[in-house]
Amino acid sequence: MGKKAALTLDDADPRVIAAREAEQRLFDFYGLKAKTHYIALPHLDNTRVRVNDIGSGKPVLIVPGNTGDGFPLAPLIAQLKGMRLFILNRPGGGLSEGIDHRTVDMRQFAVQTITAVIDALGLDSVPIVAHSIGGHFSLWTAMDRPDRVSALTLLGVPGNIISTRPPFVLRLLAVPILNKILFKLVRPKSPENALRGLSFMGHKPEVLNNLPPAMAECYYYFQHLPHYQISSLSLMESRSAKIKPSELRNVRQPVQFLWGNNDPFGSVDVGRQIAAAIPVSEFNALEGAGHLPWLDDPVGCGKLVMDFLERH
C-alpha cells in the first residue's frame, strides 16, 4: 500500500474538533469515561487507528460496522459493566486515519488490522463483539487466526454471508462515479436530519427520536471529516468476498448472533441458516429490531451479550 493512500487528519482542523467534541458529549450522556490509544499499523505504512479504552475488568475488543466509527455503539457499551472494552475505530472511521480500501486485499487487511491491534494492546486471545461488516472482518480473523479470538458476538447481519446483502440504496453506493453523486445527496445537511438514514436500517421513528442529540451530531460531524467519503465509498466498492457455509463450519469459537427481524440486510431465516453452519452458536432473533439492534433495546442486548461473554 502506498503512503498516499493513508489519509491523515489534522487535530486542529475544525471538522476534527467538532467530531471529537460531539463524541465526548455522547460519551458523557451515557456516563462513559474513555481513554484514547493510537496504534500504528505496520501492514498499512503505519496508518494510525484510534482505540477508545472504556471500563475495567476482562478485556473485550469491539469492532464497529459501517465505515468504522465506534460511537454508535455507545448505548450498548454503557450496558457492559465490569469489562475493559477496547473499541477499534477501523481505518477510515472514528477519527482514525483514512484508507482507500481498493488498494488492499480485504481479507488480509481485515485479519492483519485486528491482530495488529490485539498485539499492540498486549492481549493474547480476546472475545470480540462486532457489528455488520466488522462482524465479517472478525469472522475472517476467527478463521485465519483462531489463537487470537476466543469468542464472537455478532450484532446485526455480519456482512456478506450466504445470501445476505445490503439494501438496494446501499448497493448503488458501490457503483463508481454514481456513488460520489449519491454520497453528497444522502450525507446529512445538518445534525437535525443526521439520523434519517437509520430508518433505512429497519429502525422505527420513535426509536431514533429517543436517541440523544449528541448521537445525531456524531453522525453529522463524522461523515463530514475530510477522508470519510473515500474511506466509505472505497469500502462499498471493494465488495468483501462472500463467506460460504463450508467456511463457517471451520469456525472453532462459540458465536452469538443478535439479529433484528427488521434488519434489511438479511431475514431471520437466513440468519438461522448461518448460525446452523457454525458448530457452536447461539441465535437470538430480536423482535422489532433493525440493523443496529442495540438502538432498539440496549438493555436487552446488553444482558444477552454480558451473559454470553461471562460463559465464554
Image (spheres, rainbow, N blue to C red):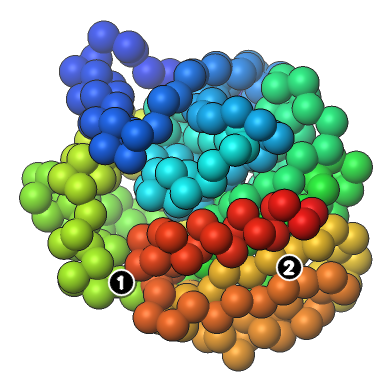
Q: Residues within 10 Å of mark 2 (few under 14, many from 20)?
A: some
Residue 242 spot, x, y in % from top left: 69, 68
Q: Is residue 19 visible?
A: no
Image mark for residue 18: none
Picture layout, residue 77 above or below residue 17: below
Q: Kindly give the residue lying farthest to the front in the view shown.
A: 82
- Quadrant of the drawing holding the N terminus: top right
Q: Position of residue 269 (x, y in %)?
A: 60, 90
Residue 263's image quarter? bottom left
* CA distance separating discs 2 and 1: 26 Å
Tag 2 residue: 243
Q: Is residue 192 above or below residue 29?
A: below
Residue 172 percent location from the top left of the image: 37, 67
N-terminal of the pair, mark 2 or mark 1, is 1
Question: Which amino acid type corresponds to the residue marked 2 in the rendered image?
Answer: Ile
* Residue at the (9%, 45%) spot, across then down: 190
Q: Which residue is mark 1?
A: 203
Q: Percent position (x, y) of residue 299?
A: 43, 60
Q: Nearer the viewer, residue 44 or 159?
A: 159
For the C terminus, the image quarter is: bottom right
Instruction: Give the vertical position of 208 relative to 24 (above or below).
Output: below
